[in-house]
Image (cartoon, rainbow, N blue to C red):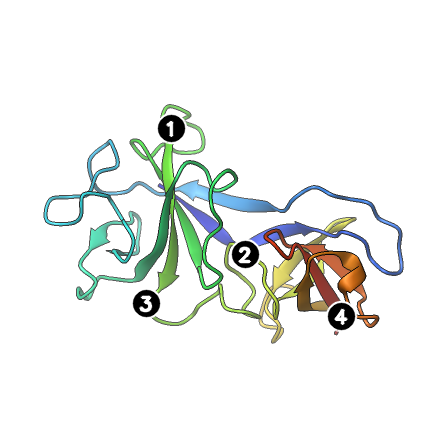
Amino acid sequence: MEKRRVGAVLRVLLPVAAALTLTACRHPVGTPSTPATGSGDGSAPSGYGVEFLGPADCSSRGEAFREVSCGSEKAAARVLARHTGAPSAGPPCPPTTDFVLHISRGGPSPGDPGGQPRGYACMRNLESPHPGDPGQGGGPLTVVGDCVHGFREGEVRETACDGSGRRPPEFEITSAVARRALCPDTTDLYVRLGGDRPVGCARRM
């Protein structure tokens, strides 16, 4: 099982002050795989649902993510949604997702291509912090209310709006629209978000 890091690199669509024409989608930054407890085919341990970490199930936190009762003191996060296949080809996670667990057959590590991805679980912590909430600087999605800083030419990375992240915020995404022409005149930066309103209108802070 692999947990996706909360931060992600986003492509800038077109800064107002510079003519950039990058159109590639955002690229999440991964972390080393974490093995899951359960059978090698991704089924749940005895006593739980037929699907390992299905919707509304809970997991523990530590060296390995295990499915536990949501009433257990070991429960740390709840499954908001569970999908098969890869996130790049499947439905997006809910906006309140804090992190994504990639559930694989046998839980392969990045250097071991033997396991094939079985799906992914969109997770939310049972208690704070919630990096997926607007302005908190993390989560697999970038939404209205999030802040970003310059990363590489034509790219930005999400960071906490209150300045508590590794890098201070430079722009705040104030709205999301279907196309750039619908952004306010005060927009300083356009960021690709995805979804049915794929353009983020951001203002310099």
Q: Give the spatial CA distance, label 1 vs label 3.
A: 29 Å
CB contact under 8 Å: marks 1 and 4: no
For marks 2 and 1 on the same chain, the one whose residue lies earlier in the sequence: 1
Q: Which residue is mark 1?
A: 116
For marks 3 and 4 on the same chain, the one whose residue lies earlier in the sequence: 3
**Left or right of 18: which side holds 132?**
left
| Viewer-closest of 51 and 125 | 51
Characterize the local packing of mark 4: few (<14), some (14-19) or many (20 or more) Cα atoms within 10 angstroms.
some
Q: Which quadrant: the N terminus?
A: top left
Q: Which residue is mark 2?
A: 141
Q: Which quadrant: the C terminus?
A: bottom right
* Number of marks drawn: 4
CB contact under 8 Å: marks 2 and 3: no
For marks 1 and 3 on the same chain, the one whose residue lies earlier in the sequence: 1
Residue 105 position, x and y percent, is 31, 31
Residue 69 position, x and y percent, is 17, 59
Q: Dot 4 lies on which element?
A: strand
Q: Which residue is mark 3?
A: 126
In the rendered structure, which amino acid carries the disc numbered 1?
Gln
Q: Which residue is mark 4?
A: 203
> At 42% across and 50% down in the image, what residue appears?
100
Q: Dot 1 lies on which element?
A: loop
Q: Give the spatial CA distance, label 2 vs label 3.
A: 19 Å
**Left or right of 121: which side holds 186?**
right
Characterize the local packing of mark 2: few (<14), some (14-19) or many (20 or more) Cα atoms within 10 angstroms.
many
> At 60% across and 76% down in the image, what residue appears?
162
| Viewer-closest of 74 and 52 | 52
Q: Give the spatial CA distance, label 2 vs label 1.
A: 24 Å
For marks 2 and 3 on the same chain, the one whose residue lies earlier in the sequence: 3
